[in-house]
Image (cartoon, helix red, strand yellow):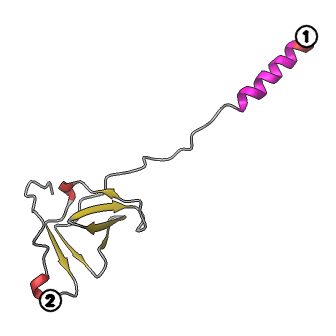
Amino acid sequence: MHRKFSIALLAALLLSGCVVAPAHRGPEWVVAPALPLVVELGVEPYYYHNGFFYYYHDQRWSYSHERTGPWRELPRDRYPREIRYRGRDGGGERDRDRDHDDRRRD
């Protein structure tokens, strides 16, 4: 009887050490909402909208919950149609190199 109790106790202690409960965390990434049709950037290429930071570099947009990243590529259907820059002369107001996707869902 004593031996069965010892084995059951030992098994319970060993098995309880093997149980790992995952931390409840939501999904790592949620696709950010679409940017407005016109985005105006300042000196730095960051834009904040609906709880997300957006970063514009090399004609591509990335997004993150934090300004320091980690950054994830924004789907092209969520790009703005026009990018304007504050503090530049009238000739460089728009990003003319960007290809405009008219198939964007609003």
Q: Position of residue 5 (x, y in %)?
A: 86, 17
Q: Quadrant of the N terminus?
A: top right
Spatial separation of the CA atoms under disc 2 and disc 1: 91 Å
Q: Position of residue 84 (x, y in %)?
A: 17, 77
For residue 22: magenta?
no
Which residue is tagged 2? Answer: 89
Residue 65 versus residue 94 in the image, above or below? above
Residue at image point 50% right, 47% down: 25
Label 2 packing within 10 angstroms: few (<14), some (14-19), many (20+)? few
Q: Position of residue 13 (x, y in %)?
A: 78, 28
Residue at image point 41% right, 59% down: 70
Q: Which mark is residue 22?
A: none
Q: Which residue range is magenta in the image?
A: 4-17
Label 1 packing within 10 angstroms: few (<14), some (14-19), many (20+)? few
Label 1: which secondary element: loop
- The amino acid on which the numbered mark 2 sits, given as a three-letter code, is Asp
Q: Is residue 61 left or right of residue 20?
A: left
Residue at image point 26% right, 68% down: 57
- The amino acid on which the numbered mark 1 sits, given as a three-letter code, is Met
Label 2: which secondary element: loop
* Outermost residue to the right: 2
Which residue is tagged 1? Answer: 1
Residue at image point 71% right, 26% down: 15
What secondary structure predominates along the stretch shown in magenta? helix
